[in-house]
């Protein structure tokens, strides 16, 4: 697959991603290979409201804090 | 967040008939006011860390009770699916000329939220507005494609200063495939796909990587413990009003002070 110029070599990229997504640091691990499908979220209120008005779709609204006691990286 | 509901395959399927908005609580004054109005409609309540409701397309009329999480409104995923089907039937979707790119309001938040969800972040960048619009259009289509829906997050910007925290960022136009770190406060570019790349090749690239990677799951307790030990201290944009969260943060800040040299 040719995707164009790489910032880092493919091997480095894979190694980097494995570090970030699989090995990670303490307290995180990768689930089985392949990211599962999920809900597609608008993260900006005005974007979502405009999309709903234009499409006529109802709105599934949720909010959550992207930190716990000030520690980011977790809901 | 109630993952048992939001990761339910039938709820995910039904979500395609809705515009799904997930806001970061306490990260924008206007959005916090909106959430406060929705949350307190059934009685005066202080805005909590989490809010859930289903609204009509006008964003005003509530089609469900508002509460902290879907389980408190519907009790079970099956009940929620039934309600979503009924609501979707009453609001058939109209064709739309253009789909907006689902993204967060700034890169700092986008990186953190991607880390929270344990998924990669794809950033479209170009200082040329017309080129950026092309990148956004491509990414928006991919974001809602059957192969990629919900598998990664997206962000776009024309401001190189906003991306200065990305290691190896040199200001080149294109699609930056990024792996957020554990706390969502650092970013590494794994791949740069040039802006001129055909959309089908961008899609091929993303499908390949998201098939290869796994979603990161974090142990909440050990993540927080490690974050406190490392001095991680996320600052919200607006004051937190969730009383329980405020008390917990005060205790954590006391721990931070003891650990600081």
Image (spheres, coloured by chain):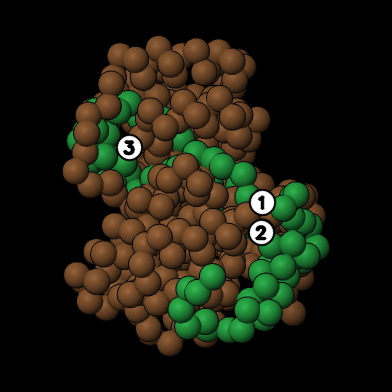
Chain colours: A green, B brown
State yes or no: discs 2 and 1 in contact (Cβ < 8 Å).
yes
Q: Looking at this view, is B87 or B26 the one in front? A: B87
Q: Mark 1 points at which residue?
A: A34
User: Percent x, y for residue B236?
Assistant: 48, 57
State yes or no: discs 3 and 2 in contact (Cβ < 8 Å).
no
The residue sitting at 63% across, 54% down in the picture is: B211
Residue B174 lies, with reference to residue B154, above or below; the image says: below
Q: Looking at this view, is A9 or B130 the one in front? A: A9
User: Percent x, y for residue A43?
Assistant: 40, 48
User: Percent x, y for residue B247?
Assistant: 63, 45
Marks 3 and 2, how far apart in space? 39 Å
Dot 3 alpha-carbon crowd within 10 angstroms: few under 14, some 14 to 19, many 20 or more: some
The quadrant in which the N terminus of chain A is found is bottom right
Residue B85 lies, with reference to residue B148, above or below; the image says: above
- Circle 2 — which element? helix
Q: Mark 3 points at which residue?
A: B34
> Is B231 displayed left or right of B5 in the figure?
right
Q: Which chain carries label 1?
A: A
- Circle 1 — which element? loop
The residue sitting at 43% across, 65% down in the picture is: B201
Q: Mark 3 lies on which chain?
A: B
Q: Residue furthest front?
A: A1
Q: Which of marks 3 and 2 is in front?
A: 2
Q: Mark 2 points at which residue?
A: B212
The answer to whether any part of residue B105 appears in the image is no
């Amino acid at each position: 697959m040719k995707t164009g110029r790489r910032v880092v070599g493919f091997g480095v990229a894979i190694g980097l991603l494995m570090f970030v997504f699989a090995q990670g640091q303490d307290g995180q691990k990768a689930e089985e290979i392949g990211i599962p499908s999920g809900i597609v979220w608008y993260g900006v209120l005005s974007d979502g409201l405009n999309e709903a008005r234009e499409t006529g779709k109802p709105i599934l609204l949720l909010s959550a804090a992207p930190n716990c006691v000030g520690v980011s990286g977790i809901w | 967040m109630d993952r048992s509901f939001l990761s339910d395959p039938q709820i995910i399927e039904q979500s395609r008939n809705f515009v799904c908005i997930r806001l970061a609580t306490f990260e924008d004054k206007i959005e916090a006011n909106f959430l406060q109005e929705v949350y307190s409609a059934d009685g005066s309540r202080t805005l909590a860390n989490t809010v859930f409701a289903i609204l009509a397309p006008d964003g005003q009329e509530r089609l469900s009770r508002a509460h902290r999480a879907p389980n408190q409104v519907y009790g079970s995923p099956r009940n929620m699916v039934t309600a979503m089907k009924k609501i979707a039937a009453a609001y058939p979707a109209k064709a739309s000329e253009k789909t907006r790119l689902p993204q967060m309001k700034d890169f700092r938040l986008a990186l953190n939220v991607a880390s929270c969800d344990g998924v990669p972040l794809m950033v479209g960048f170009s200082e040329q507005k017309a080129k950026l619009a092309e990148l956004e259009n491509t990414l928006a289509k991919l974001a809602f494609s059957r192969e990629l829906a919900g598998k990664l997050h997206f962000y776009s910007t024309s401001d190189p200063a906003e991306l200065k925290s990305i290691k190896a960022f040199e200001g080149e136009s294109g699609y930056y495939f990024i792996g957020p770190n554990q706390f969502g406060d650092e970013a590494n570019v794994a791949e740069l796909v040039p802006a001129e790349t055909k959309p089908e090749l961008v899609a091929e690239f993303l499908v390949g990587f998201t098939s290869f990677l796994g979603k990161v799951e974090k142990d909440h307790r050990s993540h927080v413990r490690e974050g406190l030990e490392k001095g991680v201290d996320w600052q919200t944009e607006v004051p937190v009003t969730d009383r329980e969260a405020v008390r917990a943060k005060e205790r954590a800040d006391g721990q931070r002070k003891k650990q600081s040299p």
